[in-house]
Image (cartoon, rainbow, N blue to C red):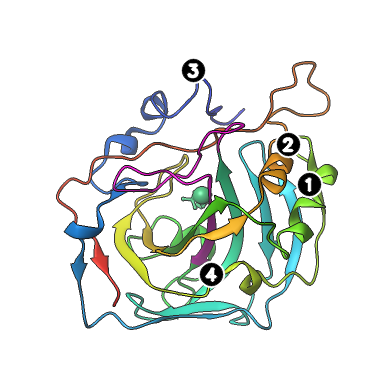
Amino acid sequence: TGNQWGYGKEDGPSAWHRSYPVAKGSRQSPIDIIPEQAFHDNSLGPIIANYDHCTSINISNNGHSVVVEFVDSDNRSVIQGGPLDNPYRLKQFHFHWGGKGCDGSEHTVAGYSYASELHLVHWNAVKYKTFAEAATAPDGLAVLGIFLKTGDDHRWLHTITDALYMVKYKGSVTDFRGFNPKCLLPSSLHYWTYLGSLTTPPLHESVVWIVLKQPIVVSDKQMGKFRTLLFTGEEEEERIRMENNFRPPQPLQGRKVRSSN
Ligand SMILES: NS(=O)(=O)c1ccc(S(=O)(=O)c2ccccc2)s1
Ligand SMILES: [Zn+2]
């Protein structure tokens, strides 16, 4: 049923092109960001994230990551400014991470990987009627990427890591209300931006990527809780720990990465 893809040896990123030929396309993500080669574009304004009236709905394990979904039937939580021509609505956020002691970010910075990467997924509800329509349009999605590095405890991430035991298995979902992702943003919103794709199948080339330069700090213990999740469902006999759910950097193919001031 549907296309089975994963992060293992047989079904991982190097095999995705068989079912998703766009995997070898001209604007694939993630990429290795080389700061010195990024173009300082003075016309790039600040990113504005208006999450104050956002409404989280649930938290779930979709067999690839842990996802928090939001009400996106109006413009109550949007990102705008920067490279974006209009406001994009927050739909969900999720994470990518490594194994114990290993890094698991998707974008890298001059070859450097972070422990994890948070993706806040938004869609262009001004130009497109539905998320599904926006998801295949070249300017349909805007994903805000935030690096996580290990160090002190992140006081707000506890709200998420304390809920992970309820979504241990693939296909599990539970209520998750009143969470404002503003608490996960670093103090600086300086960013790199480039045109790319979803980093998982269906790998649509529909994403304006906005990757924040400043990582947030979370503890090893908090990262460890992500690794208690499973790729596998409760009914499956095989239990496979959810870790290393990241795609490696893809060819830049002549794309320009711009840098905010
Ligand atoms: N890692 S990422 O942020 O690039 C990403 C991968 C998949 C999604 S999606 O679930 O929003 C989605 C979007 C469109 C079609 C299907 C799923 S977002
Ligand atoms: Zn992602």
In the picture, residue 74 is in which quadrant? bottom right
- Which residue is identified by label 2? 229
Mark 4: which secondary structure? loop
In percent of width and height, residue 257 lies at 24, 60
Lower position in the chain sequence, tag 2 or tag 4: 4
Q: Which residue is mark 4?
A: 186
Element assignment for label 1: helix
- Give the Cα separation between the discs numbered 2 and 1: 7 Å
Q: Is residue 5 left or right of 258 when viewed as pictured?
A: right
Say whether residue 116 is magenta.
yes
* Amino acid beneath label 1: Leu
Residue 256 in sight here: no
Q: Secondary structure at mark 3?
A: loop
User: In which quadrant is the C terminus drawn?
Assistant: bottom left
Position in image of residue 37 (x %, y %) = 17, 57
Q: Residues within 10 Å of mark 3 (few under 14, many from 20)?
A: few
How far apart are the two marked residues, 3 and 1, measured between alpha carbons?
26 Å
The amino acid beneath tag 2 is: Leu
Name which of mark 2 and mark 1 comes first in the sequence.
1
The structure residue drawn at horizontal position 18% and vertical position 45%, both measured from the top left corner, is 253
Question: Mark 1 sits on what residue?
Answer: 164
Q: Nearer the viewer, residue 247 or 140?
A: 247
Looking at numbered disc 4 in the image, what kind of residue is underneath it?
A: Pro
Q: Main secondary structure of the magenta part?
A: loop
